[in-house]
Image: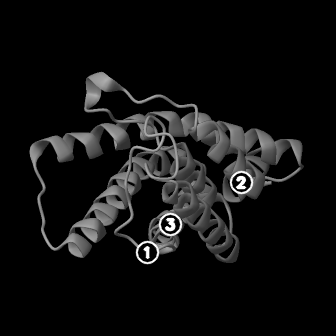
Amino acid sequence: MTLFLLLAAFVVQQFLPAFTGFHHSRILLVQLVFLCCAVTVNQPTMLLLAFVGGLLWDAHSALGPSSGDPAVYVQAVESLRFGYSVVLFAMVGFLMQGIQPLFQRGKWIFSAILTGIAVWLYLAAEYAFINFVRGDFVFNQATFFFFFFIALFTMLLSPLIFWGLYWIAKSCGHTIYPEASRRKKRTQ
């Protein structure tokens, strides 16, 4: 089910506008859905999601201005190799897996905050890769605020994604907070 949710995020990502008043930042829905799913699933499933998400993100980004509409595909990435996003998705996925015990106790707020941090780290690592390949490194105030607003807007949407995951798990007869539900049963 999480794989279908990730694939649906790719479709919806195409229709999300940029916030022009905030350094043309946008919500990275694909990364957000991946991060929220990464904290709810086991490690092999997270790696599968990282592989699928990373490859599809690279395929999406490979349709740069020469291959697609410049109004839609504004990020030219012809200097990066296909497949680098799999590594970035896996890195931030392992970061989310690190706080999985807190999430399983029902403390999802830490996961919501970490999604913002993980998105910022994802963007910074991708930017570092691009600068390394190009042979120069420029990190100015506009770039910082661009990353900051993307991470902030993405993080603010994370409770909605967590609620959706909780609702899907509940409708399938599964719990994503196993320790929290065990404590509730003991106290009743």
| Marks 3 and 2, the one that precedes in the sequence | 3
- Is any part of residue 107 visible from this angle? no
Q: Residues within 10 Å of mark 1 (few under 14, many from 20)?
A: few
Q: Amino acid at mark 2?
A: Ile
Q: CA distance from mark 1 to mark 3?
A: 15 Å
Q: Residues within 10 Å of mark 3 (few under 14, many from 20)?
A: many
Q: Residues within 10 Å of mark 2 (few under 14, many from 20)?
A: many
Write down the residue under mark 2.
176
Q: Position of residue 136 (x, y in %)?
A: 12, 69
Write down the residue under mark 1.
81
Kindly state the secondary structure of the residue where label 3 is placed. helix
Q: Position of residue 137 (x, y in %)?
A: 13, 65
Residue for point 38% across, 70% down:
80
Q: Position of residue 120 (x, y in %)?
A: 33, 53
The foreground one among 1 and 12 is: 12
Residue for point 79% across, 43% down:
168
For residue 89, the mark is 3
| Marks 2 and 1, the one that precedes in the sequence | 1
Kindly state the secondary structure of the residue where label 1 is placed. loop
Up/down of 133 relative to 143, above or below: below
- Viewer-nearest of discs 1 and 3: 1
| Marks 1 and 3, the one that precedes in the sequence | 1
Q: Amino acid at mark 1?
A: Arg
Q: CA distance from mark 3 to mark 2?
A: 21 Å
Q: CA distance from mark 2 to mark 1?
A: 36 Å
Q: Amino acid at mark 3?
A: Phe
